[in-house]
Image (cartoon, coloured by chain):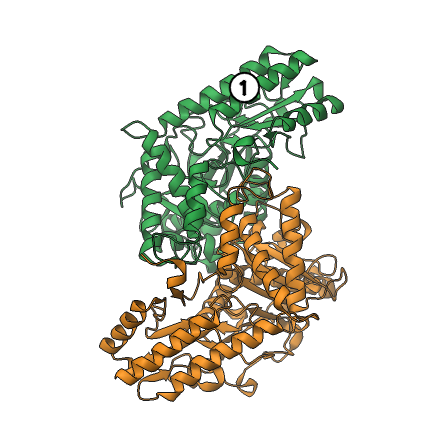
Chain colours: A green, B orange
Amino acid sequence: MPTRDQVHYFGAGPAPLPTPVLEEASKVILNYNDSGIGITEISHRSADANAILAQTKNALRQLLDIPESDGPDGYEILFLQGGGSGEFSAIVYNLVAAWVGAKVKEVGDDRIAEELRKMRLDYLVTGSWSLKASQEAARLVGSEHVNVALDSRKFREGKFGAIPDKSNWKISASREDVALTYYCDNETVDGVEFPAGSPSDLPNLVGDMSSNFLSRKVDVRKHAAIFGGAQKNVGTTGITIAIISNRFLPPNAEYAKPDLLRKLGLGVAPVVLDYPTIAKNNSLYNTLPIFDVWIAGQVMQRLVDRGPQQQPRIATQEAESDKKANLLYSVLDASPDIYRVVPEKEARSRMNICFRVKGGDDAAEKAFVKGAEAKGLLGIKGHRSVGGMRISNYNAVPVVAVEKLVSYLQDFAKSQ
Amino acid sequence: MPTRDQVHYFGAGPAPLPTPVLEEASKVILNYNDSGIGITEISHRSADANAILAQTKNALRQLLDIPESDGPDGYEILFLQGGGSGEFSAIVYNLVAAWVGAKVKEVGDDRIAEELRKMRLDYLVTGSWSLKASQEAARLVGSEHVNVALDSRKFREGKFGAIPDKSNWKISASREDVALTYYCDNETVDGVEFPAGSPSDLPNLVGDMSSNFLSRKVDVRKHAAIFGGAQKNVGTTGITIAIISNRFLPPNAEYAKPDLLRKLGLGVAPVVLDYPTIAKNNSLYNTLPIFDVWIAGQVMQRLVDRGPQQQPRIATQEAESDKKANLLYSVLDASPDIYRVVPEKEARSRMNICFRVKGGDDAAEKAFVKGAEAKGLLGIKGHRSVGGMRISNYNAVPVVAVEKLVSYLQDFAKSQ
């Protein structure tokens, strides 16, 4: 019957949260802001809820230096439901509606069907999640519009684990045909992560940052949209955060109407995933899980408080994340007979550290997990689809937890 | 700075939760089941999470007597995200895909476009939410397929507040053309509720029970689907519960493929709202907010425990809900010079009691709210779109709260 401080949890998500945030949560769940009403009970339209929303957005802007402007250079922060998987769909519905809307303006109703044939959604597939996202795009708009510009498995005997450089990407030739260019910044299952700042200079760039959000600086301005489920570095399952360029929201963008989209054989977004509707209503079109926003806001405020004075205030956390990841990889690399990191060196994730024990020997891996659990080091098994070990090094995993795990890695290696 | 027991909250949703459930929540959020890990942190694929899911489904089956069978007579319980508004869309995507799939089997690919012209979605519009649902259906499949079989405003000078009986409903003539018949059992904004057991005997009946779920018996077997956001009687914002007849799930139903749906000019569901996918994965296709499921499970188990020994075990709660509502309406009716209940008597909601004070006089209504708040009676203002007062009588509102409110209603009336 361990207590909270007797275990260290390295699960891949839902992920650990800072204990002080959960301690505060355990209070506000009964009585928020001395109102006599708990935070899960208050109205999403109350003054308290609005203050929580505003504080959370403000903290996020400071952490990632998100441009705040009503004009086309600004970015809107949306809170949605449905997780990263919901955004696989949302981003397609919305950016395609924006692309078709702009094209109709340009060529008129008569020629839109013809022009549509050229539309492309470029996907950089580097792991299980970007693969799923590309498959969802094909469901919603038809595979003829989906260009898998990179399938990294082709570079590594059918398995994920590498991120070949840009010279290997088969980007659509004409930028103006591209409704979106999609990548998953960090692949949770496969343990690969794009180098910081890559990809960039691609049309209508969309980054899924579900599992490395708020772990490093991001050049928001190079993106049309960035999204992430909250349940890794940011908070709890229940909300998804999307950062959208105003260029893809009214009045700068005029989305094609559902009637036209259907006529053209494209999917139509459910209203709860329609970015213009959610933006217009400050994420309160329908009932938003305010408790989950509050958790994210608390987590973000802690990062703001420990960050540097200037934006992006995530810089301090980035240094810590790098340090923890480097520590783990260096220990793994130091015992090559015992541990083998799965992805290639250049593509290693700082968030999800995937490795095999003794070449994937079943008994050895079971013994490794058992020994870890005996020391209160939990959640280190790899995703069921790939096996092996996975240590998730999210923000709420303290340095001391990583140090304990490092000791265990060293002791286990010695014992073999 | 009131404490929890100094206030009584009558908000329309998010709604109050039983204090013992929140007290337990405040513990498990730090350490669930002596694992050393909090409930928002545990994996949705862990044994603990699976047990929570199973317990919650089992309690719900007992409360509403939901048939459990793998065959076409059984019903599946799904947990989704996106709230009631998300289900406005989901129900259309799914039941239309099932209708088209069945029709293709019958008439073949060649004649499906022709047959599709006959497809109808019948909507009984009795308030703000069913109106929104009908509008969403038109967005997704085209208004030519949406038959507003009832718009109750036509019976009451343009305003909601009545539920004319079946003889006034313009149901589509041919049952086999109807992909779904939609109603909202209780309209939260307008305070109207269908009489128990009505509507029924309509093809592919779908009930939105977001705001009266688990407040009375429901003949599940008469429905194709029932859904509800959890944040009224059941739990917190973050999960939506859908009860789907196996007749609308594989292997009993074969959904039309996305390619065909797009070709036919119909919307395509995002994968997170695709019922067959969610059902096949026991609601764990993507990360499910397990904390919210746990809350719902706790609330349901309390109802099971106080219910009769036989199903439906919701019977005890139903009696209490009726009693509380009757008490409130009788006090309002006793002072007709002061209070006027907005909806017609036959259509009055047991959950959301909407009334005006002194004919809607602004000063009187403000004084009424102020006086209530001074006594710790909170959340009684009507929806911003209709004004007036609204007392929400959800399950977690204790009898003692209603009694205090009744005293206040009487005192206020006397003081005028």
| Residue at 45% in and 34% down | A213
What is the quadrant of residue A56 in the picture? top left
Vertical side of B199 occupied by A63: above or below? above
| Residue at 35% in and 71% down | B382
Q: Secondary structure at mark 1?
A: helix
Is A96 or B384 nearer to us in this picture? B384
Please indicate whether residue A402 sits to the left or right of residue A367 in the image: left
- Pick the quarter of the image with the C terminus of chain A: top right
Is A63 or A8 nearer to us in this picture? A8
Amino acid type shown at disc 1: Leu
- Whether residue B398 is visible, yes or no, is yes
Residue under pointer 1 = A328
Q: How many marks?
A: 1
Q: The disc numbered 1 marks a residue on which chain?
A: A
- Pick the quarter of the image with the N terminus of chain A: top right
Please indicate whether residue B134 sits to the left or right of residue B197 in the image: left
Vertical side of A66 occupied by B18: above or below? below
The percent coordinates of residue A94 (x first, y second) are: 45, 48
What is the quadrant of residue B167 in the picture? bottom right
The percent coordinates of residue B377 (x first, y second) are: 36, 68
What is the quadrant of residue B376 in the picture? bottom left
Q: Name the residue at the left extreme.
A: B363
Crowdedness of circle 1 by 10 Å Cα count: few (<14), some, many (20+)? many
Is B182 or B185 nearer to us in this picture? B185
Vertical side of B397 occupied by A248: above or below? above
- Whether residue A263 is visible, yes or no, is no
The percent coordinates of residue A63 (x first, y second) are: 34, 34
The percent coordinates of residue A117 (x first, y second) are: 51, 45
